[in-house]
Image (cartoon, helix red, strand yellow):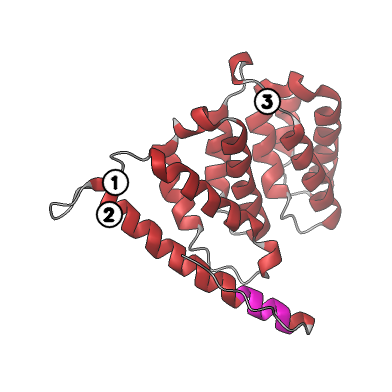
Amino acid sequence: MAEILVRRAGSTDEFTRLTSITWINEFVKLGGEQLVPYYADILGAVLPCISDEEEKIRVVARETNEELRAIKADPAEGFDIGAILSIAKRDLNSEHEATRIEALHWFFTLLDRYCAEFLAYLNDIFDPLLNALSDPSDAPAHEKIGVVDSQWIVHQVIPSLGNQGQSENGRAPWEGLRERCRKEWGLFQTRMAEAEKAYYEMMGITPPNVIFVS
């Protein structure tokens, strides 16, 4: 049943999408940890629906997303962190900002709960996370918490990088990686400052004197 609902959640028919995501929502509420084998598939259906054109679908998808996040499954009992990370990584490339931000939230959630397991997938996810910091989003600063979370993730995993990266011109691999991180962080600070300035102007609020420290 879960597989059928997941497939139909991506239907081109609006009513079918709404019906499917509503049923998925009920299954998640009732099933909880029993749905662990379908966790990644369900998340893969929910994240795109967060950016659906129909408001009702967006609302149900967001609620379902939070219900999924509230389930604290145990990797020892079949919870596949790698599958969840694959879905989140996929949706970092979504054309829809709301979906990209929720994908970033999932990276934060998994790192916070399953740090050791998360780091095992570092080679596959580090570059996409850094690229996410370069997202040219025009969203107000208060809507970009997902990007802030990804920056937190980068700083959390930097001490564990070891020999990640490429050796160039006689420099150790980590030196080039550190340089890239600093560059991305500088770009991120600039975008955040511009986003906050635009937000305060839009709201007619005098901005506080905020100084970013690198």
Q: Which mark is residue 38?
A: 3
For this orientation, the residue located farthest to the top is 77
Q: Is residue 176 above or below residue 60?
A: below
Residue under label 2, please give it: 176
How far is the residue under mark 3 from the one under mark 1? 34 Å
List x then y, in percent, for residue 58. 79, 52
Q: Identify the disc placed on residue 165.
A: 1
Work out which residue is located at the far left of the displayed protein and give it. 170
- Look at the image and give the residue range highlighted in magenta: 195-201
Residue 25 left/right relative to 163: right
- Asked whether 92 or 150 is in front, the reply is 150
Q: Is residue 189 left or right of residue 124?
A: right
Which label's residue is closer to the chain start, 1 or 2?
1
Q: Secondary structure at mark 1?
A: loop
Secondary structure at badge 3 equals: helix
Of residue 41 and residue 92, the one placed in the foreground of this image is: 92
- Disc 1 marks a residue whose amino acid type is Gly
CB within 8 Å, label 1 to label 2: yes
Residue 100 position by quadrant: bottom right
Judged by depth in the image, the label closer to the viewer, 3 or 2, is 2
Residue name at image x 28 percent, y 39 percent: 163
Which numbered disc, 3 or 1, marks the residue closer to the eye? Answer: 1
Mark sitting earlier along the chain (3/2): 3
Magenta stretch encompasses residue 159 = no
Please report the residue visible at 72 percent of the width from the left and 84 percent of the height from the top.
Answer: 201
The crowd level at tag 2 (other Cα within 10 Å; few <14, some 14-19, many 20+) is some
Q: Amino acid at mark 2?
A: Gly
The location of residue 68, given as percent across then percent down, is: 74, 34
